[in-house]
Image: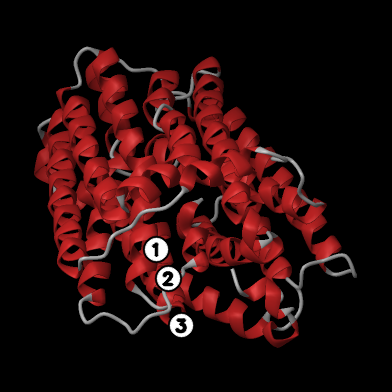
Amino acid sequence: MSEAAATAGTGSERPHALRWWALALAAIAVSSSYYEDDVIGPIADLLHRQRGFDQAQLGLLNGVISVPNALIALSGGILIDRFGASRVAWWSAVIGVAGAVLTAIGEPYGLMVAGRFVFGVSEGAIFIALIAGLARWFPASGLALATALYLSLARVGSYAVDTSTAWAHALYERGWQAPLWLGALVSLAGLLAAGGFRALDLRRGRSVRGASVVAGRQTLRGLLSFDRSYWYILGVHVLYAAVFFPFRTTFAIEYFQHVKGLTLREAGVTNSWVFFAAIFATPLFGLAADRLGRRASMLVLGTALLPATFLVLGLSHADLWVSTVMMGVSFSLVPAVIWPATTLILEPERLGRGLGLITLVQAAAMAGANLAAGWLADRSGAGASNPAGYTPMLVFFFLTGVAALVSALLLWRRESGSGGHGLERPPRAVPERALRV
């Protein structure tokens, strides 16, 4: 969602000597947020066995964090402009720790849901705030590299939580609660990093103020006045996220245990490789898009790998690493291309409005997909004793992935013609206006 906002950076002054420290602290803060975001997946089976949660309850625990995400997407920019990016990042980190603690207490179930909702407020704001903060630390000529590194390092959190079933195995042996307290400690580390980022910002002595109220009113007018390329790429954003994140963060580890016969430790490590690969491959795919163009074609390729992954999972006996590599390539390629492509499609004065609408619909879709997948699994009696019960869930993810592919193909068709925005052209052939966002 907010990754693309970084491409609209306004930094044009001489680079500050502390900018790499600011980037490191921002990466630690957002990585801790990613860790807590994904903390439910590795303990899904424990919650089933020790607390009797059904699939719908697990889906709600991850789906509920998307609800405040949508609200923050529309209001976060105003708060950042009014109070400053580093201050909003600090506030968000405080809220995140509170949500992680409530989740770790975890009883009754309603308190755990409330904790995930509170954390969602933080998760939806801190990413945007840190991106905006980095845009003020780095000049325009270095902001793309900084953003790519920020995104790659952020995914260290997703990798760490999946591999925690190995390096923190002793905690998982103690039951469902101990790994959640570990997540709370990781969130506290993120809070300290956000505090360091705030301190650097104060040391720099830069005031961030703006007339965001007027801009917000302008954003609300003519909200739907975008061309077809925008709606096609919105479809890719929304449908891709509605498949990848619910499956990988909520259901994948348990699916690997119940259907593929992996232990919890093996399932967590296998799932983690998708995020581990993205740490290194995302900047490489972004560099390829910058050098070669063909962004719409690359989106078609990356999106096609998503439904293909579920065909391999559900219809073949191929080694699990085959589907893991396929999804890892997809998750590295699509985010690296789709956000810069979105900034090329949107006019500079409509960039915030367009990204806000994408984020709003995307959050709703991810919440709905989590609930729908959990309901399908429950209705089919999915579990260790009934591996076939996961089939309707896989079919749901496969069909949603096909819909994302259709959106990517429609985008490619339009961008290959005269009515496009240069996504298929080499970088030097793209109009200069489109590049200055």
Q: Name the residue under label 2.
A: 148
384, 405: nearer the viewer: 405
- The Cα atoms of the two marked residues, 3 and 1, are separated by 18 Å
Res. 151 mark: 1
71, 173: nearer the viewer: 71
| Side of 87 relative to 424 (left or right) | left
Q: What element carries label 1?
A: helix
Q: Which percent across, then down, holds residue 8? A: 52, 66
Q: Name the residue under label 3.
A: 141
The answer to whether mark 2 and mark 1 are in CB contact below 8 A is yes
Q: Which percent across, then down, holds residue 373? A: 54, 28
**Image height check: is 311 above or below 135?**
above
The three-letter amino acid code for the residue at tag 1 is Leu
Q: Which residue is drawn at 46% across and 77% down?
A: 140
**Residue 246 in view in this figure:** no
The three-letter amino acid code for the residue at tag 2 is Ala
Nearer to us of marks 3 and 2 is 3
